[in-house]
Image (cartoon, coloured by chain):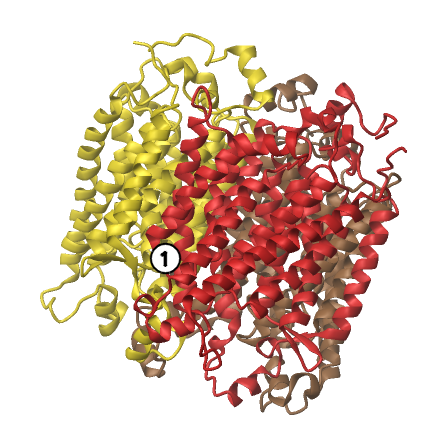
Chain colours: A red, B brown, C yellow
Amino acid sequence: MAWNTNLRWRLPLTCLLLQVIMVILFGVFVRYDPDADAHWIEERLGRNISSDMDNEFYYRYPSFQDVHVMIFVGFGFLMTFLQRYGFSSVGFNFLLAAFGIQWALLMQGWLHSFHSGYIVLGVENLINADFCVGSVCVAFGAVLGKVSPVQLLIMTLFQVTLFSVNEFILLNLLEVKDAGGSMTIHTFGAYFGLTVTWILYRPNLYQSKERQSSVYHSDLFAMIGTLFLWMYWPSFNSAVSHHGDAQHRAAINTYCSLAACVLTSVALSSALHKKGKLDMVHIQNATLAGGVAVGTAAEMMLMPYGSLIVGFICGIISTLGFVYLTPFLESRLRIQDTCGIHNLHGMPGIIGGIVGAVTAASANTQQYGQKGLAHAFDIDATKTTWTASMQGSFQAAGLFVSLAMALVGGLIVGVILKLPFWGQPADENCFEDAIYWEIPEDQKSLVSRSEDPTLRPTEP
Amino acid sequence: MAWNTNLRWRLPLTCLLLQVIMVILFGVFVRYDPDADAHWIEERLGRNISSDMDNEFYYRYPSFQDVHVMIFVGFGFLMTFLQRYGFSSVGFNFLLAAFGIQWALLMQGWLHSFHSGYIVLGVENLINADFCVGSVCVAFGAVLGKVSPVQLLIMTLFQVTLFSVNEFILLNLLEVKDAGGSMTIHTFGAYFGLTVTWILYRPNLYQSKERQSSVYHSDLFAMIGTLFLWMYWPSFNSAVSHHGDAQHRAAINTYCSLAACVLTSVALSSALHKKGKLDMVHIQNATLAGGVAVGTAAEMMLMPYGSLIVGFICGIISTLGFVYLTPFLESRLRIQDTCGIHNLHGMPGIIGGIVGAVTAASANTQQYGQKGLAHAFDIDATKTTWTASMQGSFQAAGLFVSLAMALVGGLIVGVILKLPFWGQPADENCFEDAIYWEIPEDQKSLVSRSEDPTLRPTEP
Amino acid sequence: MAWNTNLRWRLPLTCLLLQVIMVILFGVFVRYDPDADAHWIEERLGRNISSDMDNEFYYRYPSFQDVHVMIFVGFGFLMTFLQRYGFSSVGFNFLLAAFGIQWALLMQGWLHSFHSGYIVLGVENLINADFCVGSVCVAFGAVLGKVSPVQLLIMTLFQVTLFSVNEFILLNLLEVKDAGGSMTIHTFGAYFGLTVTWILYRPNLYQSKERQSSVYHSDLFAMIGTLFLWMYWPSFNSAVSHHGDAQHRAAINTYCSLAACVLTSVALSSALHKKGKLDMVHIQNATLAGGVAVGTAAEMMLMPYGSLIVGFICGIISTLGFVYLTPFLESRLRIQDTCGIHNLHGMPGIIGGIVGAVTAASANTQQYGQKGLAHAFDIDATKTTWTASMQGSFQAAGLFVSLAMALVGGLIVGVILKLPFWGQPADENCFEDAIYWEIPEDQKSLVSRSEDPTLRPTEP
């Protein structure tokens, strides 16, 4: 069977169909949160709120914008490291995220913001939608270069759905804390993506091996993504924490963890090269692992030195993963992980879940104060039996649930994506923008010099 | 007559002269707003404001910074898509914006912030100055590659002046709402720029056709501009709205409209290519049309699904414009629109004005609440005759005024810019950095390989 | 003696050792500020603070994020202008800043936030740590391309220490105002770096001259750095000012100064080129001098026109410096200043110190109001003898102390860095990523075409 990568009808129809459904569902279900509704002036006077400044907007919006940059520029440019896949990296990430946030507003809205028959939308919903899409961007990293934009939209549709269900189980049923999403975003996203790419295994991928590396300037573009992720990660981990000290503390802890992670990533990168040279792949990715791994515990009393230790360890593990584990996964387990998300999101996500469970289990009134402990873990009068170790156990359970959902979900979605009519590229055309994009002359000539994938008959 | 593009005296003298005038006018007229003046501590105690946190700075500054990024990085990098005009795109945008904001602070200050003989400056003035310059950046897109920096400074001087007058007519005389500037910024900027480029029509522009396209990495640089515009657009449309729910709602609506716009832009881009391939031009530009088109209505009760519909339509119209209308404008109407601003700002701006008028005309107390309606449309005791349909009519009138100002203003400024002593490039030297910039060796060799525009005698 | 640039053990051991020390010191000394501690809910009720919104986090965090972007993306990308040193510019800046902020948190913490045996950490500490590292990034600009990452870490260790001591002398002993760090950050950082590079003088640096220039796209990458520095500089100069009017005013003044600076930089750049062409080096650097030079006075009643004048002058002086002074410093004073930091941070920093002293010396109650003056200069009951001229003298003294600390400190650190075992490159291998980085194929072939620095035996 010949692969047909012409998306002329498949992509437009998919996009338009999904967008029409979004319009209809938004029309039926979505309204404004009281803080964003024109009735607010009456509402707030009724609630005896004196100032417009007490609108939730001012508490959350700056963090939202930082998270927004991470999703679109951060993830988008991080994946431009491939020499001939920059358009697709940035462009498909843009597409899937733009669809994903709409679907996430609905899914998360139904599960968390449904009041009197309507989803009410405020700035916190926007942040959570971006978070949800973050897990899709993570999974995209595993299949980067090997799937069509139609496949990505289908994957986004399913992954956002599963993410929201998993998040509901964790946050509402198990009542775990996971403000920065070590479990819900990173662990779930990574193992979902890895399972999908395992199902989509391509035995002849070596045929496009030469395009699977970077060029000098593509590595610099990728550093734009890395740095915006790294700089704004404190906002990511603090964006939906409780106002006040929790948000403040989450930012500080993340800042510390990320700083430590840079030093150990550099150390390992150099130590593992026979001439002591640094590898851009490690600098672009492993330096971020510290942000992933404090995603659960950042808002807790992890302490600055605790954050440093987490970052310290994750920089090491993540870099080791790139050097030893990724090749092993590919050759032995048939898991082709383009961006090495297992090292950046998978392992650090699990560590983050464990760190969160341990930190929660060791919480006490001395550290938090009586009121502080109740506030931090939302212990109200109804939870008379709450104990820290119980919270720790639920946290650990949440980690396992996320892993299970990721593996089962990834399996199902992977099989769906394997269907032969989504426009996926042949093995020798992977990691190639020219399949899906009108390409400028300079790059076209490069193609024709070696091999123009659009001119050759292609079979699997 | 030979074109002389040597700017050695013209550019320095223009810059220094303008800047000296700015210093003098600022010295005579500009002081600090009470919120930025050292007397504030007394002022606020007098006004019984208890906390420094109630300073306007904290309400507006984060939005200001986002808008600032859009003007300088957003517009600047969006225009770097040309293969040999990156320095000029970023650099001239930087120059004209740096001058424009100063002149806008004065012009808008005289018209809106003039108290006891002085312009008083606060953070909202900075945002409005950035907005005003935004319309110049839009117009710059139409003439990109075909004008000298001296011409751009002259154009900025006049356009900022006209913008401020038009804005005064709309906001103060017609009392229309246009917080995100669909009319004042985008419609005005686009049709002003299109008229200027129509006057400056170059019949032999085909001579520099090969430089009017992109190269692979220039398209990636342009995506930096696109994404920062796209991500921060919710801040743009909400930056000067009323505090509280209006600002909150404007951000949500813009977020929704932009998300929908991405999907329909991608759909149309693929559908209009014979092999279903995506075109970077559409992804870079049409995806932003949704932000333009909710510029007027975003702060109103447009509803999230209303925003999705607007974005949906604009993605389609904008992409269609790039494919069919831009070539038509160039071949039939002699309008050479380098960046396709008619598709990104012109048509979506008009749609935005219409959407705003319709949304305003259908406003009612059920949607807004009694107090909410009065607050949203600034209806105080003096406006006893206010009706929604009247507001709608004034909104529509504002759109026509903006168009008229743009066309007449563009005509006059175009004729001024046609004068032969501003250092404009010859037709075969358009879209070429080497005319105005000292160029690194790698790019110089490219020039000499084909044609060094600085070495050849050039005539019109 | 042959230079050995293999860092396999030196870099990993340095990184790991420093990071372990950080973990231990953080464990012993660092706790959370009350605003970031879980006890805050009790604390704030005790202090009768009604709302979580009064947490310091919301006053400072948006400014912190802007400053953070300036340090990592701003400085990092500004230095990517070199054609073959982009990885090192961004990567080493990342490394030294990640270490530097941790060490700065400790040093500044001991000197400014030490309570009952602990350093208490809040968002203002994060900003100050970024500021401190900013001065290291400045100094990095002088030695860019000529030192190893191990040397940079050693330099960071010492410079952060000296910075903190100098800052303590200025702010706590001399009680000067320097919110944007004209003296503590820019003057100190620049003259420290220049002294270090003077000690590290390389007589045969001409051997790597061809790599000391830019290529077309590296100049565009550098513009990303320039623009993010330029746009966020108002946040930099206002980030740690008093809440309310001071922060507001600092942002406005910086905005004005930077705008003026762009026009005079462009004017001079064109006027000093024989064909009137602009030089990217000036646009990338001199346009920022206005931000440096209002670093001290921005929060004072400098007035908008005062800011314009400062920016006006600095654009001229900085551009003149690049054209005339940098070559002179290199040929006559043996100061090899890779990025021209003397023009961007040195001279403008001194101007900033002087402007600050003069502005402070001319402060009066008419300008500030009685309470405003006391608030602006922290005059409490204990300072009965405070006069404006005295403040001005202390400001001037602060400038001299900063210069003295920079020169003496730079001398000592320079000598330490001259020791031959830090892995520094030979003269012909300077400005070359391939020494310290695994390089993609496309750039490798460039190396082998001319000269592969890793293959040739290298001696000093």
Position of A66 with respect to B42 (left or right) is: right
Q: Secondary structure at mark 1?
A: loop
Nearest the camera: B253 or B143? B253
Quarter residue B408 falls in: bottom right
Q: How many marks?
A: 1
Position of C117 with respect to B243 (left or right) is: left
Q: Position of residue B323 (x, y in %)?
A: 83, 46
Image quarter of the C terminus of chain C:
top left
Tell me if residue C445 can be seen: yes
Position of A450 with respect to C350 (left or right) is: right
**Residue that badge 1 annotates:** C239
Position of B304 with respect to A15 (left or right) is: left
Q: Residue furthest top?
A: C457
Q: Position of residue B118 (x, y in %)?
A: 42, 69
Q: Position of residue C148 (x, y in %)?
A: 36, 25
Q: Is residue C445 above or below residue A6?
A: above
Instruction: Please give the name of the residue rendered at 24% of the width and 23% of the height, measured from the top-left corner.
Output: C199
Image quarter of the N terminus of chain C:
top left
The answer for which chain carries disc 1 is C
